[in-house]
Structure formats: C-alpha cells, structure tokens
Amino acid sequence: MPELPWVEKYRPRRLSEIVNQEDAIEKVKSWIEKWLHGNPPKKKALLLAGPPGSGKTTTVYALANEYNFEVIELNASDERTYEKIARYVQAAYTMDILGKRRKLIFLDEADNIEPSGAKEIAKLIDRARNPIIMAANKYWEVPKEIRDKAELVEYRRLSVRDVMNALIRILKREGITVPKDILYEIAKRSSGDLRAAINDLQTVVVGGYEDAKQVLAYRDVEKTVFQALGLVFGSDNAKRAKMATWNLDMTPDEFLLWVDENIPHMYLKPEEMAKAYEAISRADIYLGRAQRTGNYSLWKYAIDMMTAGVAVAGTKKRGFAKFYPPNTLKMLAESKEERSLRDSIIKKIMREMHMSKLEAIETMKIIRTIFENNLDLAAHFTVFLGLSEKEVEFLAGKENAGTIWGKALALRRKLKLTKREEEKVEEKVEEEIEEEVEEEVEEEAEEEIKEEEEKKEEEKPKEKRKGKQATLFDFLGKK
Ligand SMILES: Nc1ncnc2c1ncn2[C@@H]1O[C@H](COP(=O)(O)OP(=O)(O)OP(=O)(O)O)[C@@H](O)[C@H]1O
C-alpha cells in the first residue's frame, strides 16, 4: 500500500496538538461554544487568516472532531459554491440525534470569492443556522461585505523552531532519525509553511538523505526569488533592498521582470506605482548599456535602481504578500474564456512544436507579435498549429483576425490540394506495385503450371513404358 502523505498521517486530530497558535485556538473555541450553548455569536462566520501551512484547515477538522461536527468543506473557486452554501447554511441545526451530526460549513480560499457572489454570500451568513468558518491567506482580498460579517482570527507564521519541533515529532513517531542540519535546512526553506516542510521531509526520507540537498534544491530558485522580492517590496529600507540580488541565481534582467510584474500588485497609489516603474525603466536602460560596454559601475547602478529605487517609491501593501512570476498578473486579468483560449493555444504549441510548457508560453508571446504584424506568417501558424477562429482572434485581435483566418483557409485549401496530389502519386505508385506483384505472381503461377506439366510429361512416358512393359510382360507371359 502506498504510504499516506505525512501531512495527512500526522495532521493533529486535537486542537491542543496544534503548534503555536494558542490565541487563535482560544478564539475559535469560545466562538463555537456560543453556538453550542444555544446562542449563536453575533458574527455567524469566522475568518481564519494567515500564511499557508500554519494550521487553519487543521483547526477546523480538529474542532469538528472534538465538538462532533460534520464538516461540509466548500471551495470558493468552485462555481457552485453559492448554491451549496445556501443548502447547508439552512440545514437543520440538530444535536447528535438520529445519528445525524451538526454541520459546520468550511469555506476555504475565501480570498477567491468573486465580487459578484460576495453580496449573496454575505446575506446567507446573516441567515445561517450553522457555523461557517472561512479561511484565507490574504484576508484583505476577501470581499469587504464578507469580511464585515466575520470575526477575524489571525494565524501566526510558524518559526523555524516551530517547524523543526513539528518535524522531530513526526520522525519520532516514524522511528527514524535525520541529521539536525538537514532538518534545519528544511525548516529554514519552508518559511513557516509546515505543509511544505513536512512534504520535503517525507521526500528526503524516501529519497535517502545522502542527497538531501539535491532533493531540496528544486525549491531553491523560487524560494530565492521570493526572498529577493521580499527585500524589495517588504520595506522601504534602501540598504536592505540593495541586498536583494546578492543570493539570487538569476540575471538582473530576469529579476527585473519579476519586479516589474509585482509593482502593480504591491503598490497602492498610482503615483507611487509610476515612480516604481520609472525606477525599473531607468534600471533597464542602464542594464542594457552595462551589458554592451561591460561597465561594472553602470551595472551596479542599474541593480540599485531596480531594488532600492523600487523599494523607496512609496507605501506598499502590508501583511502577507504573494508574489507572482512574470506575466501571471496579466493572465489573471483575463477572463475565463481568454484563459482557456490561452491554455489551449499553449497546448497546441507544446504538441506541434515539441516544447515544454515554459518554452511554449515564451513562444506564444513571439507568435502573438507575429500575429499582430505579419498576417501571412500568422496564417501559416494558424494552419500549422491547427488554431481555431477564436484562438486566432485571441492572438491577433479582432481587427486582423478575419484577414488571417481568410488567408489560413486559402492556405489550407492549397495544402489540401497538394496533399491530394501527393495522395494521387502515392495511389499510382501503389497501383504500379500491385501490378508488378500481380505480374510476378502470374509468372510464378505460369512457371509452376509449366513445371507441373513438364513433370506430367516426364511421368507420361514412364507410364507408357510401364504400359509397354506390361504389354511386353503380358506378351511374354502369354508366351
Ligand atoms: N500549527 C500547526 N501545528 C501542527 N501542525 C500544523 C500546524 N500548521 C500546519 N500543520 C501541519 O501542516 C499541514 C498543513 O496545515 P493546514 O492544512 O492546516 O494549513 P493551512 O493553514 O490550512 O494552509 P493553507 O492556507 O495552505 O490551506 C497539516 O497536515 C498539519 O499537519
């Protein structure tokens, strides 16, 4: 039997086992007890907010376990969430009779609730007859209507020591030891995300920890760039920000793309955003110049511009920041339909051009420029990749899409014609081969017949001779 993931196997079943979130747990307990004592709290929903892997989901299940609730887990990004909440929020709030348990509604990823649905969900919370607990990493992105209806419970980011202790406890129960320095490495890399740390630990143990560093290395690139972004966007301390690129396994112009991507997400005021953009565009110019001339002082100036220059541009978002890789924000801004078009185009590029996903994403950017500027080439791509009319429109924009589509149709017809011709040639060759084979077979058959006939011919005189002998014998006998 495959081994259960340790995050599940060792998920605390009791609230008291949850590490270093005492204040949060106290709040949750007193809130649920109000429900149990028959006077639901004023705020019928609870919003657990905090970094990933800090124990929010675990709290809900341990709570349900201790107070005998059935958890109805819903996800905010599920399209039918509203419908489901509506159903369960009104479910009879009965005690544990007839084997039925009270229901506790758990809505994860509350920071993903669509603004359009938020008002409706807020109304449902008012009417709720069952406790509703929501969880979010970024509570400020939970729609305000919902935030107002919920009591906020904040979860701390777990420390390196918390994470290490939790890992050691798991190892004890597994009866395994792992060198302390590796545990420390895992804990440090996790940035307080205990889920990530436990997963890493299991990977290392299963993979043999002789090459633990290698096993863990895959996390490094992202980790360091997020840390670097943290230095740039985490404070307005220019000195700290300048250290951002020190440990970074990435060229400055690559890192610039990351900074660029996250500026609109991190800065709140347009004029400060503009200032930050100005800093990176200046950095970009100097980076280019430094590259051409090999002038180190320009290089350093460019890096300082894009780290310190951005850091001091203004007031940034507070709290837990989630950083996005280059281009994701633009992708998020797209509608669902656009996203699915983008995905299907990327898939086609991967398939037809034999590329990895990342390569395909990059290639799509180039193809997009082609679609905007070179309609003939665009038509070729349309046919080659087998794009649909909608996909062409996505790449080229409404204006050019028609022209490209027309050209592609013509091209496809032409290709079909040449294909038809090819097929004809093929058919002809096949016919010829068939004929040849037939001829051969016929020849062989003829030969066989001939041979047989010859054999028969040969046998005939024997018979004749036999006949002759017989007659002669007879004759002699008669004699
Ligand atoms: N404070 C904690 N004490 C003990 N174990 C924890 C704690 N936080 C997380 N864990 C462990 O980490 C795993 C993930 O935790 P959990 O699912 O509760 O995270 P979360 O805060 O809900 O994260 P996310 O926001 O990513 O859903 C669980 O299996 C649990 O074992």
Image (tube, rainbow, N blue to C red):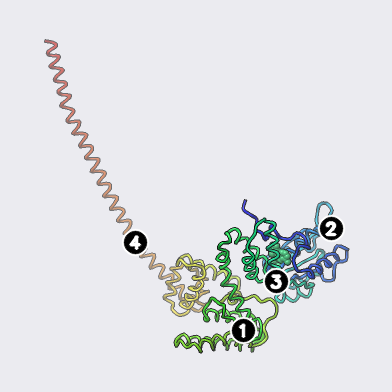
**Three-letter amino acid code at the position of disc 4:** Glu
Q: Is residue 39 left or right of residue 411?
A: right
Residue drawn where x is 45% and y is 88% of the image: 293
- Secondary structure under badge 3? loop
Local packing at callout 3 (Cα closer than 10 Å; few below 14, some 14-19, many 20+) is: some
Q: Which mark is residue 91?
A: none
- Secondary structure under badge 1? helix
Where residue 53 appears, x then y in whole percent?
A: 69, 67
Q: Which mark is residue 241?
A: 1
- Secondary structure under badge 2? loop
Local packing at callout 1 (Cα closer than 10 Å; few below 14, some 14-19, many 20+) is: many
| Cα gap from disc 2 to disc 1, whole angstroms | 56 Å
| Cα gap from disc 3 to disc 4, whole angstroms | 69 Å
Local packing at callout 2 (Cα closer than 10 Å; few below 14, some 14-19, many 20+) is: few
Q: Which residue is mark 4?
A: 422
Question: Image height check: is 179 above or below 462?
Answer: below
Q: Which mark is residue 159?
A: 3
Where residue 140 appears, x then y in whole percent?
A: 71, 77
Where residue 162 appears, x then y in whole percent?
A: 71, 68
Q: Which residue is mark 2?
A: 94
Q: Are marks 1 and 4 in contact (CB under 8 Å)?
A: no
Residue drawn where x is 17% and y is 30% of the image: 458
| Cα gap from disc 3 to disc 2, whole angstroms | 40 Å
CB at mark 4 closer than 8 A to ligand 1?
no
**Three-letter amino acid code at the position of disc 2:** Thr
Question: Image height check: is 444 above or below 23?
Answer: above
Question: Image height check: is 395 above or below 286?
Answer: above
Judge by depth and name the residue closer to the eye, 109 or 124: 109
